[in-house]
Image: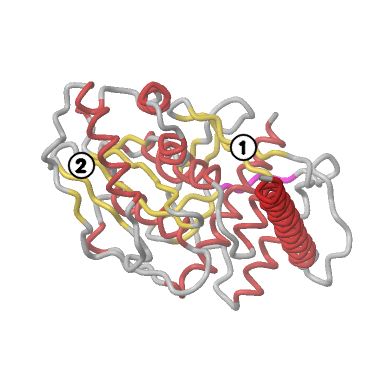
Amino acid sequence: MHDLLLLLNEEEEDAKRKKKEEEEEAKRKKKDEQDEHRKKNEEEEEEKKRKRSQISPSSLSRRVSAGTRIRRQPELYTPDDFRYHKATKVNVSTSEPIYVDSQDSTDTLPRGKKEERRDYVAREALGVAEKDFMFIGTVEGYENFLSFNDIQELLFTRENESVVIDCYVNAYLFLPREENPDIFLNFGYLGAALKGYVQLYRDDKSKEQHFDYAFGKLDRAPNEFDLIFSPMHVGTNHWALLVIHIKEKEFHVYDSLRNKDRRDIPQYVEELKRYLKGKHIDADKWPLRYPDPCPQQGSGDDCGIFTCKYMECLAHRDIQDLSISQDDMPYVRAKFALHFIKAYFNAQERS
């Protein structure tokens, strides 16, 4: 009996020792992961600082604040056939949307080397302090603000946040549509953050609240639109576009990296179908299609820009003539950044 008790005690001690070793090993592994994560963050911050230091050309050594910027007649730009034009008539304030009359416009953005285009926009960016937020307007219930870092992301080919896509829809689609409704389809917009919020929660109540918020921003019932755009943040670092074709009774996906695994897209579509059914739209049998043409990106972080261009072409009824490519991206990014900066200074100088 004594030997049996000793054996049991030894086994118990061995178990305790083994458990302690496992706990220590887990702590070491966790510490190593934390150290690796911290090191990665530090490297990313260094890379950000390095790229930020490149935003101004070497000939521009002084940053001009918005408050000391020389007053001049503002210029505002609006897209037409994928080009930038100087507007002839502008009505801008800090609390109202931006309206642009682009008749008799002339091309103004340089089409030279990528560095030349970037430096041209950088000269304008010098007037935006890093602490400033750039008001782009309020349309369809969305108030759009861009930060200095958002502009840097556009200039330096980084991944785009949802706010950049929302501001694009405001400045490039909603506002021009108010001036020239005949050249646009009747489209609605659900906001670039919706899919992320819906798939973040597991309970139906939270999902429905986010759907209610997004659909509540529409200016009419969902079944009164031709198209409803829903930009989707897919996976961990990719943007694609979901289009709800109300009249055709189909869901279309425009994805600039079509070969990737996108299993969360059908899941999101099923969530949408359930919600639409509660809005008296029976979408259960609507197919999910991946139509052509759908220009594909090369390497890089241009998926958000492609997503914006898909919406632009669809809203203008000319998706069949969609001809953008990876080679166009530096020019398109510079156009976006310049448009937002000009809108900011218009608001500053007219306030």
- The x, y position of residue 245, in whole percent, is 20, 42
Query: In the displayed structure, would residue 333 be above or below residue 164?
Result: below
Q: Is residue 146 left or right of residue 182?
A: right
The residues bearing labels 1 and 2 have C-alpha atoms spaced at a distance of 29 Å
Q: Point out the stretch of residues depicted in magenta.
A: 72-76
Q: Amino acid at mark 2?
A: His
Residue 123 in sight in this render: no
Q: Residue furthest bottom?
A: 113
Q: Residue at x 75, y 66 (%)?
A: 47
Q: In the image shown, does 11 or 344 lie closer to the viewer?
A: 11
Q: Is residue 297 left or right of residue 67?
A: left
Q: Residue at x 52, y 70 (%)?
A: 300
Q: In the image shown, does 310 or 262 lie closer to the viewer?
A: 262
- The x, y position of residue 14, in whole percent, is 70, 54
Reading the chain from its start, which is encountered first: label 1 or label 2? Answer: 1
According to the picture, the residue beneath numbered tag 2 turns out to be 245
On residue 20, which mark appears?
Answer: none
On residue 145, which mark appears?
Answer: 1
